[in-house]
Amino acid sequence: MKRATFLLPIAIVIVAIILSSLFIVDEREKALVLQFGQIKSVKEEPGLAFKVPLIQEVVKYDARILALDTDTIEVTPSDDRRLVVDAFARYRIADVTKFRQAVGVGGEAAAETRLSSILNAQIREVLGADQVTSDTILSEDRRGLMNRIRDQARGEALALGLDVVDVRLKQTNLPEQNLNATFERMRAEREREAADEIARGNEAAQRVRAQADRTVVELVSEAKKNAEIARGEADAERNAIFAGAFGADPDFFEFYRSLNAYEASITGENSSLVISPDSEFFEFFNNSNGVPAAQ
């Protein structure tokens, strides 16, 4: 009985020592086994691992791709138009040993502070290069600029045991004090473009109007010419008919002409003629047969 009472605490201590020597590495983690602050082993494969109890400790780091939002900074491209840039990066811990040696007990927070400084420095360097303008940064061509920032930041981040996977510019805006001036300049440019378009439109409309007027003149002239030709042909035909009628019966033709003269002279409600009844004008009225009196 006394022996069992003595062995039970020993068994409990042994079990506690065994349990404290075991640790689990998750598939999303990387682990370091430290002894008095020195790295003794690296555990990157998921599963069960061992350490010396009380002497060694385990530090775990996230093995996934992490996101980092950089501080908003101002950059000055080659055209001296300042821009406010807000970027973010994706990175992962590539070399956990080098990472621990670089940041010490600060861990991921210290690493992100140093990585943010690296990214901001590279953003200023790339976006402030001689051939980089604000228009390039604000256009689709900035993809190449982001790749340059990523590649240059990756080279420096490797010293921290970090691999910069991607860098993106979230916002590239003008400073608040420059927005009004930029807006006025853009409005002036749009007004100038609008005035150019209106001038070109008026010029095109004038050409169309002149062409239409020319077409109208040509059509009217052609119509008048055809009308005069038709009128002349009709007059010629009428004269031919008159001439034929005169040749066939001169007396009837003379009578017809007299009737037309009577009709033309006695028109209106108040028409009156003062003429001698013996005048030749009424020669057909003086003969009941419609034949002029013999002279």
Image (tube, rainbow, N blue to C red):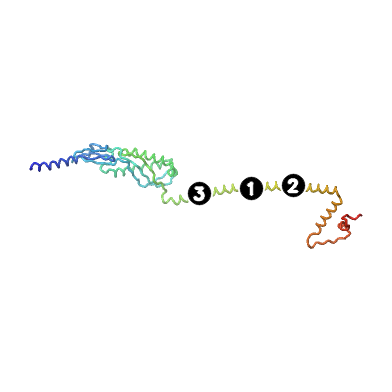
Rendered image: mark on residue 212: 1
**Going 46% across and 50% down the picture, which residue do you hit?**
183
Q: Nearer the viewer, residue 143 or 220?
A: 220
First along the sequence among labels 3 and 2: 3
Q: How many marks?
A: 3
Give the side of residue 35 with respect to residue 220, left or right. Answer: left
Callout 1 amino acid: Ala
Q: Which residue is mark 2?
A: 230
Judged from the image, the secondary structure of the residue bearing numbered disc 2 is helix
Callout 3 amino acid: Arg
CB atoms of marks 1 and 2 within 8 Å: no
Give the side of residue 148 with respect to residue 93, left or right. Answer: right
**Going 74% across and 47% down the picture, which residue do you hit?**
230
- The CA span between labels 1 and 3 is 32 Å
Rendered image: mark on residue 190: 3
* Quadrant position of the N terminus in the picture: top left
On the image, the x and y values in percent for residue 245 come to 83, 48
* Quadrant position of the C terminus in the picture: bottom right
